[in-house]
Amino acid sequence: MAEVLVYVDHVDGAVRKPTLELLTLARRIGEPVAVALGAGAGDTAGVLGEHGAVRVLTHEAAEYADYLVVPKVEALQAAVAAVSPAAVLVPSSAEGKEIAARLALRIASGIITDAVDVEAGELGPVATQSVFAASYTTRSRVSSGVPVITVKPNSAPVQAAPAAGAVEALEVSFSEAATGTKVTGRTPRESSGRPELTEAAIVVSGGRGVNGAENFSVIEALADSLGAAVGASRAAVDAGWYPHSNQVGQTGKAVSPQLYIANGISGAIQHRAGMQTSKTIVAVNKDAEAPIFDLVDYGVVGDLFDVLPQLTEEIKTRKG
């Protein structure tokens, strides 16, 4: 069976959830071979093996932390040369897409970004994408070279599938280009204690109907009761009610959680483009004619300041 390279997104050996989702997809088209780079790369083997990686190629070097993405690109290029894979799967983060694009150029291959599904095909892996502001669904494949595919978080379940997870050292030689852009400093992002927005299984968002930064506490209370991430519409962000890093939409972040709860959001195409691939969508809006209700699985016509506190209390009661 052909092997499939999976780029490992990890922090000091702690593997992030989108990588485990990629292993699920990789098993559909071949045998997953994980590529873990940087500090703690060797510590990833246990969890990667538990989720289907037959091999884990590792390489630890200061360049991965000291410089921007080029060292990672060159390591993946070395992995492609060593393995001759059927495809390369990369998490669809901002960094992941840059790595994938640079890699595809270097190995003279095609690239598919922001896939929401990957399956085996007669002529190679077939990727499903949600395109044109989620108005269309396409199925496509790369026709030349080794397919490089980035996949959105929450596109596949995390499934245990014990495999060997044998650790092998990856030989990498860095070029002058790898050290062309140096990282001069890092500032840790302040943690809210909530899941990362693009990776969260549940997202609770607020829009213009929240009517003020001080009222986002209602959104946050519901999110915390569900263990969810907090999102915001462009209108709420532009008004200064919530940080841009939490914006969901065409000019913000695209999310695809199992459950998306939109509160006080009208449903403009700008916002829909960022959340339309959510598995289940619930909306709370006092305007029964709001466009968001054309999209949802469940809709509540009512004032969010009446509905959300009751919902939050009910969730706490059932959990309690």
Image: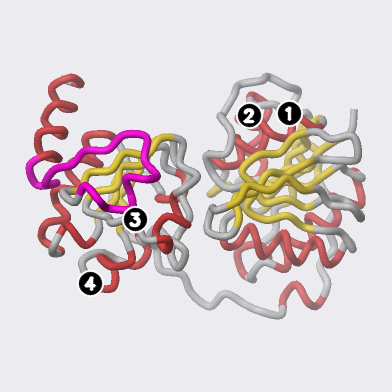
Q: Residue furthest front?
A: 289
According to the picture, the residue beneath numbered tag 2 turns out to be 46
Q: Quadrant of the N terminus?
A: top right
User: Can you tell which of label 1 and label 4 is closer to the viewer?
Assistant: 4
* Residues marked 2 and 4 touching at CB (< 8 Å): no
Identify which amino acid the numbered label 1 is placed on.
Answer: Gly
**Residue kind at label 2, given as amino acid type:** Gly
**Dot 2 alpha-carbon crowd within 10 angstroms: few under 14, some 14 to 19, many 20 or more:** some
Examine the structure image and report whether residue 2 is included in the region drawn in magenta: no
Camera-near label (2 vs 3) is: 3
Which element carries disc 3, helix, strand or loop?
loop
User: Which residue shows up at 65% across the image and 60% down it?
Assistant: 97
Quadrant in which residue 259 is drawn: top left
* Residue at image location 40% in from the left, 50% down from the top: 197
Residue 290 circle label? none
Q: Nearer the viewer, residue 56 or 1?
A: 1
Residue contact between numbered discs 1 and 4, judged by CB atoms under 8 Å:
no
Name which residue lies at 77% across and 57% down.
Answer: 111
Is 221 left or right of 66, judged from the image as shown?
A: left
Q: Secondary structure at mark 1?
A: loop
Q: Quadrant of residue 66?
A: bottom right
Q: Specify the amino acid type for callout 4.
A: Gly
Kind of residue at disc 3: Gly
> Which residue lies under the disc numbered 3?
267
Marks 3 and 1, how far apart in space? 45 Å
Query: Marks 2 and 4, how far apart in space?
Result: 44 Å
- Residue wearing tag 1: 165
Up-down relation of residue 50 to residue 151 (above or below): above
For this rendering, which residue is in front, 299 or 50? 299
Circles 2 and 1, Cβ within 8 Å, touching? The answer is: yes
